[in-house]
Image: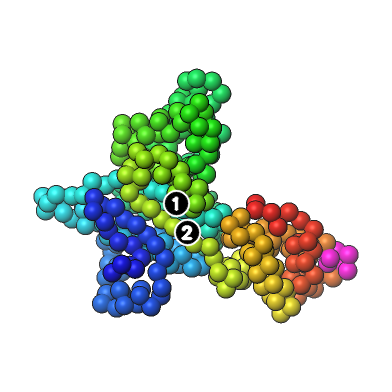
């Protein structure tokens, strides 16, 4: 079971790693697919449906199921007067930009609300500047205010390692200490998610030995494959009532391969696709205006040239 996607470890730790589809089939072949259709699982079913609208994310889908099962069984055990595992739900999300971290955090907040784990189920997104102040005492105050806003929901700290940027004298450390204190004082009142690039997150956790044990749930968001990105593009385009012509499809694939290779870990995955398509839609509008073409088919069709204009004359090649 070493390769299992998400496995419970001692002390309730769950670690999620990517798994091959073949393993997955073997793991689930004994399951009754209808079991989760029962009315008492409505909360999970709703989230599952929302997740199904997303391309890929197999390990996340499995992770959500495991979290749900764990919380549900704790609930049942409590009912029977059995010991329940300590529900520490703070998480670390490791993944490159645009891999779905914020999107998934929002869904988790919603699931926790439905399950009564969180009262409000909102998500507060924060980065270094929202936590770190300019003078002694300012940082603790800012961080506490942010925690207060997050109560009943999730506090999502992006690029969490930037808090450790300045070393000993930096106020970032004060932010970390304040967060840790809040986690202890208001243990069940909010969930903290630290997110960022995989390598930087690992280094950050290593440099702060007190931290890893406070975040028992670790999730890795893999980069999307070209095929997954194309699938995403086709969904986004359809949703907006556009279509790519045949050559545009080929062009898009070429751009994806090119950019993914060139940018490596800075490639912004889902965000790259979204930005490029939105840009292409604007390029198409300018082209149609100049050509004076407004037929239904013209209005709907994105051509290779529109993508090329979007790609070469824009900032979509950057990480944002
Ligand atoms: N699996 C997916 N399917 C469809 N769209 C996705 C997927 N993953 C990410 N996206 C889209 O990519 C964009 C960036 O996602 P986001 O959750 O903000 O990523 P991150 O927080 O990891 O940078 C969003 O517009 C999101 O809808
Ligand atoms: Mg994000």
Q: Residue at x 40, y 31 (%)?
A: 177
Q: Nearer the viewer, residue 104 or 202?
A: 202
Q: Earlier in the sequence, mark 1 or mark 2?
A: 1
Q: Main secondary structure of the magenta part?
A: helix
In this view, the residue farthest toward the top is: 136
Q: Is residue 232 above or below residue 211?
A: below
Residue at numbered disc 1? 93
Residue 179 is at least partly visible in this image: yes
Residue 313: percent from the left, percent from the top?
80, 58
Residue 175 colored in magenta in the image: no
* Label 1 neighbour load within 10 Å: few <14, some 14-19, many 20+: many
Q: For the magenta stretch, what is the residue range?
A: 287-292
Circle number at residue 174: none
Q: Is mark 1 within 8 Å of ligand 1?
A: yes
Residue at numbered disc 2? 221
Residue 67: percent from the left, percent from the top?
32, 57
Left or right relative to 292: residue 152: left
Q: Is residue 102 above or below residue 239?
A: above
Q: Residue at x 73, y 59 (%)?
A: 279
Disc 1 vs disc 2: Cβ atoms closer than 8 Å? yes
**Structure colour scheme:** rainbow
Residue 289 colored in magenta in the image: yes
Q: Nearer the viewer, residue 245 or 205?
A: 205
Q: Quadrant of the N terminus?
A: bottom left
Residue 62: percent from the left, percent from the top?
37, 64
């Amino acid at each position: 079971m070493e390769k299992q996607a998400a496995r419970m470890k001692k002390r309730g730790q769950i670690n999620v790693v990517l798994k091959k589809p073949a393993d997955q089939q073997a793991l689930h072949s004994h399951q009754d697919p209808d079991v989760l259709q029962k009315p008492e699982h409505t909360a999970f079913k709703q989230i599952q449906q929302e997740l199904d609208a997303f391309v890929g994310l197999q390990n996340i889908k499995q992770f959500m199921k495991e979290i749900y099962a764990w919380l549900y069984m704790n609930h049942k055990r409590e009912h029977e007067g059995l010991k329940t595992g300590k529900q520490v739900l703070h998480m670390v999300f490791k993944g490159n930009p645009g891999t779905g971290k914020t999107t998934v955090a929002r869904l988790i907040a919603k699931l926790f609300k439905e399950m009564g784990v969180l009262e409000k189920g909102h998500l507060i997104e924060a980065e270094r500047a929202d936590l770190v102040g300019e003078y002694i005492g300012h940082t603790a105050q800012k961080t506490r205010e942010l925690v207060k806003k997050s109560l009943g929901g999730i506090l999502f700290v992006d690029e969490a390692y930037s808090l450790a940027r300045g070393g000993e004298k930096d106020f970032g450390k004060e932010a970390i200490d304040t967060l840790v204190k809040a986690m202890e004082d208001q243990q069940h009142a909010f969930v903290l998610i630290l997110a960022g690039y995989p390598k930087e997150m690992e280094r950050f956790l290593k440099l702060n030995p007190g931290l890893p044990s406070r975040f028992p749930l670790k999730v890795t968001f893999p980069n999307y494959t070209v095929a997954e990105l194309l699938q995403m593009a086709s969904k986004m385009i359809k949703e907006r009532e556009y279509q790519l012509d045949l050559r545009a499809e080929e062009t898009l694939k070429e751009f994806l391969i090119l950019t993914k290779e060139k940018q490596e870990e800075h490639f912004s995955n889902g965000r790259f696709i979204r930005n490029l398509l939105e840009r292409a839609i604007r390029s198409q509008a300018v082209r149609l205006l100049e050509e004076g073409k407004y037929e239904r088919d013209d209005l709907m069709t994105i051509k290779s040239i529109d993508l090329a204009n979007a790609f070469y004359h824009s900032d979509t090649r950057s990480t944002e």
